[in-house]
């Protein structure tokens, strides 16, 4: 494949962004570039395959089913992120499912090839360690917010966190960058759909957010930050 020469092509903090250009290009050269349509299941919870997926131009949802059959949204991953690496490293079954949110371009690397490359390139292991640390901090922050804030404040904080990672500036305001249902938003902050509906309605009535064709746009970032009890700067 043609080399990808700049980390600027990927969101800050993602796996590809963290890698030196030569290391990233070498890893991508080991994979097969595949286009997937929206709604394609890359990884299915419980499966035993070892493929690793490097998102070149993609947004995916990471979900898992609980013992009672309910599905929970665990995370959103975007261009530059890697998914599926934990099963390749740990030789375990898939702990969650991963589904594309839109048309995607993804490098698919065989698990043993990925692990072998990581063993030869220390930068890959460093990038993964940093990434895992960031993911743990994200999860811990959400848990702290569940315990310490009301649902509407948790929702405001979540929207700001998503927009900080994935946001897109538009004429209407700051699009959070990912399409999520109210059920999925609730899954990320541990709230029921009815609670999220009420919280979202309150934020709209305050002029802080808008719903535009299934997308959520923050119309007053500073105002939403103040509502979320965060530093507006």
Image (cartoon, rainbow, N blue to C red):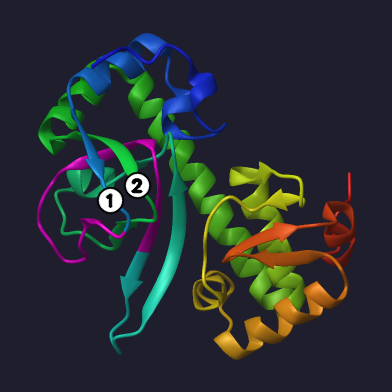
The boundaries of the magenta stretch are 39-62
Residue 86, horizontal then vertical, whole percent: 27, 47
Q: At 82% from the left edge and 53% from the top edge, which residue is drawn?
A: 221
User: Which residue does the numbered mark 1 point to in the structure image?
Assistant: 37
Would residue 86 appear left or right of 16 to someone viewing this image?
A: left
Side (left or right) of 62 relative to 216:
left
Label whose residue precedes the other's in the sequence (1 or 2): 1
Which part of the image, by quadrant, shows the N terminus?
Answer: top left
Give the structural element (helix, strand or loop) at label 1. loop
Residue 16 at x, y percent in the picture: 42, 27
From the viewer's perspective, is residue 188 above or below residue 83? below
45 drawn magenta: yes
Q: Nearer the viewer, residue 27 or 67?
A: 27
Q: In the rendered image, is residue 192 in sight?
A: no
The residue sitting at 31% across, 15% down in the picture is 25
Give the structural element (helix, strand or loop) at label 2: loop
User: In this orientation, does residue 17 appear?
Assistant: yes
Inter-mark Cα distance, 1 to 2: 4 Å
Pointer 2 residue: 103
Horizontal side, residue 92 vs residue 204: left or right: left
Residue 142 in which image quadrant:
bottom right
Residues at discs 1 and 2 in contact (Cβ within 8 Å): yes
């Amino acid at each position: 494949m043609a080399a990808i020469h700049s980390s600027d092509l990927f969101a800050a903090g993602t796996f590809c962004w963290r890698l030196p250009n030569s290391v990233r290009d070498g890893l991508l050269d080991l994979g097969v570039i595949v286009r997937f349509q929206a709604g394609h299941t890359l990884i299915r919870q419980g499966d035993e395959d070892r493929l690793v997926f490097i998102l070149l131009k993609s947004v995916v949802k990471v979900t898992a089913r609980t013992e009672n059959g309910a599905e929970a949204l665990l995370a959103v991953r975007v261009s530059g992120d890697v998914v599926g690496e934990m099963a390749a490293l740990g030789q375990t079954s898939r702990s969650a499912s991963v589904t594309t949110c839109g048309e995607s371009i993804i490098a698919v690397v065989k698990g043993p090839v990925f692990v072998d490359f990581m063993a030869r390139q220390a930068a890959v292991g460093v990038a993964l360690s940093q990434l895992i640390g960031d993911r743990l901090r994200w999860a811990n922050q959400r848990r702290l917010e569940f315990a310490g804030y009301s649902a509407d404040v948790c929702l405001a904080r979540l929207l700001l966190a998503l927009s900080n990672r994935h946001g897109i500036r538009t004429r209407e305001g700051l699009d959070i960058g990912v399409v999520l249902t109210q059920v999925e938003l609730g899954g990320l902050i541990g709230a029921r759909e009815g609670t999220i509906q009420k919280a979202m309605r309150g934020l709209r009535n305050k002029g802080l957010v808008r719903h535009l064709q299934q997308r959520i746009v923050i119309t007053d970032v500073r105002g939403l930050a103040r509502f979320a009890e965060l530093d507006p700067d």
